[in-house]
Amino acid sequence: MSSQEQTRLNIKILLVGDARTGKESRESLMRRFTENVFDPAHRDVGCTMRPLDIEGKHINAQIFTRPTWLVHPTPAIALIKPSFLSVGRFHVPSLYYYTSSVCIVYDVCQRHTFSQIEDRWLGEISRVQAEYLPPSPIPMRLYLVGNKTDREAEREVSTEEGAALAARCNMVFAETSALDGSGVEDLFMTVFTQICHDVDSTTRSEGWGCHIQ
């Protein structure tokens, strides 16, 4: 193993969102960034990875999606650290373990996917952080992502509404199209670059959301 491989930093982020956006919405964003393809018929890609070099740091950019069928467990269920390739076996809190940022994805053409962001998704993130995750020296940053901007004629949620909600809830706002790729590279590069800025390369420890391979 080379010295570069020994110092490669694993950075994990999580995509969540309403089931009615279609699971393919989040998976298509992942695959557009990691493979530069759009395949709406492709399913069951719970996680993917792309090697990146950001400001001298060599990282494995790991992107997970939260299966919408998972239920939030009772406090009696122990936290299980997830393996990279078997997300479906675990409860909701385990998906957030090692997560440095969360992207809440909604469909700009379906208002109901936007309406649940505060109560369901921000509520879940808050509960998981309070009840299950160890304290972290770096913040878990949140991003609000309006997808499917290629379907402008069908838009139900304006850019201004999305930006206003993000500002009110202390999230970073972005709009994307997995179909034509607009905004996708900028979104994920912003997310992973910010995490690199947040992490002190000399004081990483397990449970921060980042670890050395």
Image: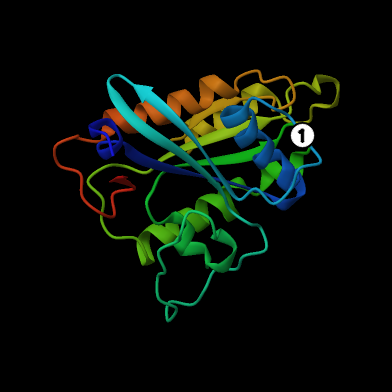
Q: Quadrant of residue 10?
A: top left
> In the displayed structure, does residue 132 sit left or right of residue 87?
left
Q: Position of residue 118 (x, y in %)?
A: 56, 48
The colour scheme is: rainbow
> Measured along the vertical axis of the image, is residue 121 above or below residue 81?
above
> Measured along the vertical axis of the image, is residue 31 above or below residue 75?
above
Q: Viewer-proximal residue, 11 or 107?
A: 11
Q: Give the secondary structure at mark 1.
A: loop
Residue found farthest to the right:
153
Q: How many other residues sit within 10 Å of disc 1, few (<14), some (14-19) or many (≥20)?
A: few
Q: Position of residue 132 (x, y in %)?
A: 37, 65
Residue occupied by mark 1: 39
Residue at 36% across, 33% down: 59
Q: Viewer-proximal residue, 118 or 50?
A: 50
Which quadrant: the C terminus? top left
Q: Position of residue 44 (x, y in %)?
A: 69, 52
